[in-house]
Structures are given as structure tokens and as C-alpha cells.
Amino acid sequence: MPSKNTIRRTSKIPEKGLPQNTIINELETKLQRDLTYSSGKILCSMCTSPHSFAKQIYQKYLEKNLGDPSIFPASAELEQETISMLGSLLSNPKASGSIVSGGTEANILALWAARNHAKKEHGEVIVPVSAHYSFDKAADLLNMKLIKVKLNHNFQMNVKAAEEAITQKTVAIVGVAGTTGLGVIDPIRELSEVALTHNLYLHVDAAFGGFILPFLKELHYTPLDFDFSLPSVCSITIDPHKMGLAPIPAGGILFKDATMSDLISTRIPYLSGSETKHSNILGTRSGASALAVWALLKHLGRTGYQSVVEHCLALTWKLVEGLQYIDGVDIVTKPTLNIVGIKSDTIDVYLLFQELKKRGWAVSLFSNYIRIVIMSHTKDEHIKRFLEDLKKILAELNR
Ligand code: PLP
């Protein structure tokens, strides 16, 4: 049976091509149903409107194909520079890796490397229950089993439970630096110690937090250890198309060094030059994505990203403060990043979600809370309007 989300629509390529304007008009009309970041109504996305400079670069270099470094050697070199810049953000400028399609692909590549590193069939990967669904996809693809461990009272991976879950079959441990649901940072330092003791591969999923945590120190927040400065960290996912403001698709997978990325490399002899090897899932892949990230890192610099983080965190605290004055709702936990979980003791969160949706708000529904993500497209007035609507909805529902 087709799923509820399946769109049943058939279409045909026109016999004779249509004028560009006609097509653009049709697209504009059809796309009106999509939400826009500029409306401020999107409070559920970990992506945002890409930076205008990155869009410019992306558009300019659409023909670049990183799958064939023999014809695009300069692009390939700039991708490696991009990885080194990201590596320097994560305490390892010598990191090896690629700009990939997103966090899902990056996490698949990490588990692929971990599996080949351990040389074990049907291996087990220990993840927190809060890990992103991309690990379920990765485990299925790679014929591995996820062992999901419970969280502690701070919604972080329970390190004791993680250590107890280690068996002969364990291939890797995964910690998350910025969980999808609540933006929580797992105790990566402690996980690194466990991984060191048991000689295990440690992957850190910092798809969201990777562009936030390195800037917290400058903003006078206590920095949390999560990167290559910890001895067992073998790979990190960091997504430029989330808090990095890069155009989609732009994920990042960084390995500690080239011996790690070589674990998943394949020689491609037909591409001119026997040196060509891929450490990716894809063959042909976007050079424009990597070049846009390269350009944006240079253009914004550390201070530019600090400002983005500062803006998002300031609004997050504004939201948290505003929520205190609304009867019937509470935060799930004090936010570490720009993600807030809202729960209610009196109202079913599903009902609340539906009412917010009726008023045009796009928020995410988790099992017992609503998730709000404050990104760079969110402005002060959007938070104010959201709080007003929430207050009205709760007053009506509680009546
Ligand atoms: N990892 C984390 C922590 C995420 O929050 C997400 C997506 O929200 C992903 C991985 C997957 O990223 P993508 O949607 O870019 O594949």
C-alpha cells in the first residue's frame, strides 16, 4: 500500500519545449505551498537560507565534479583545504575526509570505516537512544546491529550503560554532539576513555553542534570537549548545510587521518591516472558544494560564525524566558544549543502541535515534546509572535 506521503501525480515531458518564462511562472505558482525561511514560521529545521555569497559561488561552479579529480584537480585540492579548515575547527587540521551530501551520508561513511577498521562481520555499534535515524539506515546498509543505550537524567548518553553494552562484536561507539531532539552534548570525553580502554573506534556526530561548539568559548559559555583533541575520536560528522549556512547539499565527514579514510577507499582505474580513488559512496559528486563551503569559511571567518551562534543563542534564551510566563508549558531541559524542547503537563503535545500548525508554525513533534530550532533566519519578532500564539492556544485549550 502506498504510504500516506506518496503523491499520486502523473506527468509527461511535453512534446515541444515550453518558453522559460512559462515554466518559471508555473514553478512559482506551484511552489507557493512551500514554507519560506524568511516568513519566520519555520522553527523546525536544522537548515536555513544559505548565505548569499555561498549561493553565488555554488551557482558559478556547477560543472565541477569531485568524482573526477583528474579533470578537476584544483577543485579536489580545494575540497581538501576545506576539510583542513573544518579540521582546524575540530582540533585537527590534518584531518582527512570529504564534503558529502549531508549528515546521513557522513554517518554512513563513518560506520563503514569503523566496520572495515574492526574487520568484523555483523558487528555491533553502540549509540545513545537519542542518535539520529541515519545510524539506523547505516546499520541496515552495512549489515551491522545498533545497540541503543539509555540516557542519563541530563538526556546524555549513559556512559556506564555504554560500557556495559560492549561485547566481542562491538565495532564502534557513537556519541552525539548536539542531539537532533534536544541539542544535548553526550559526555564525549568519558566515551573517549571507554573507547581507549576497549580499543574501539569512536565516532562523534556533530552534524549540528560542529558549527556551534567551537565558538562557545569566545561567547563565554563553557566549552565541552567533543573533537579530535580527545584521543579516541576517529571521525566526526559536521554539516556545513546546517549551522554552517552553506547551500544543500553540504555535509562533512572528517577522519582523524588518511589511514582512516583509506579504510573505505576504492580505486577507480578508468578515470585517467591510476591515482584516482574514492572514499565516498557517490561517484560523480558536487564540486560546487565543496567550493561554496571553502568560500564561506573564508568569507565569514571565525568571527562571522561566532555572530551566527550568538544570534541563535540569544533568541533561544529569549524564547526560554518567554515560556516562563506561559501557563501550561515548560521546557524539557535547559538548552545547551539553539534547540528547545517544550512539554506540557496539561495539554497533549500532539494537540498543541496541530494548533500551532493551523496558525502556520512549523515545529517538530517528538514523542512527548515539541522541538523548536532557532536558526539564523529566526528574528526577534518571530519569537514574540510565536510566544503570543502559544499563549492564545494554551488559553483556549485550557478553557
Ligand atoms: N545527525 C544529526 C545529529 C542530525 O540532527 C541530523 C539531521 O537532522 C543528521 C545527522 C542527518 O543529517 P542530514 O539530514 O543532513 O542527512
Image (cartoon, helix red, strand yellow):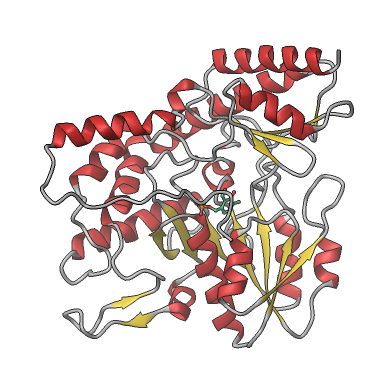
Q: Is residue 325 visible?
A: no
Q: Is residue 245 left or right of residue 183?
A: left
Q: Position of residue 218 (x, y in %)?
A: 56, 33
21 lies left or right of 154? left
Point 44% across, 47% down: residue: 240
- Relative horizontal placement of residue 395, taking residue 105 as reference (left or right): right
Q: Position of residue 189 (x, y in %)?
A: 71, 58
Q: Which of the image's four quarters has the C terminus? A: top right
Where residue 383 sits: x, y (%)? 61, 18
Locate residue 283: give its quadrant.
Answer: bottom left
At 63% from the left and 88% from the top, the residue drawn is: 121
Q: Residue at x 53, y 29 (%)?
A: 42
Figure check: 110 above or below 156 = below
Residue at the spot x=61%, y=73% of the render?
Answer: 140
Between residues 375 and 353, which one lies in front from this camera angle? 353
Residue 22 in picture, x, y percent from top left: 18, 33
144 to 359, vertically: above or below: below
Of residues 157 and 6, which is closer to you in this image? 6
Res 298 seen here: yes
Indicate the quadrant containing the N terminus: top left, top right, bottom left or bottom right: bottom right
Of residue 108 and residue 238, the one placed in the foreground of this image is 108
Q: Is residue 178 left or right of residue 50?
A: right
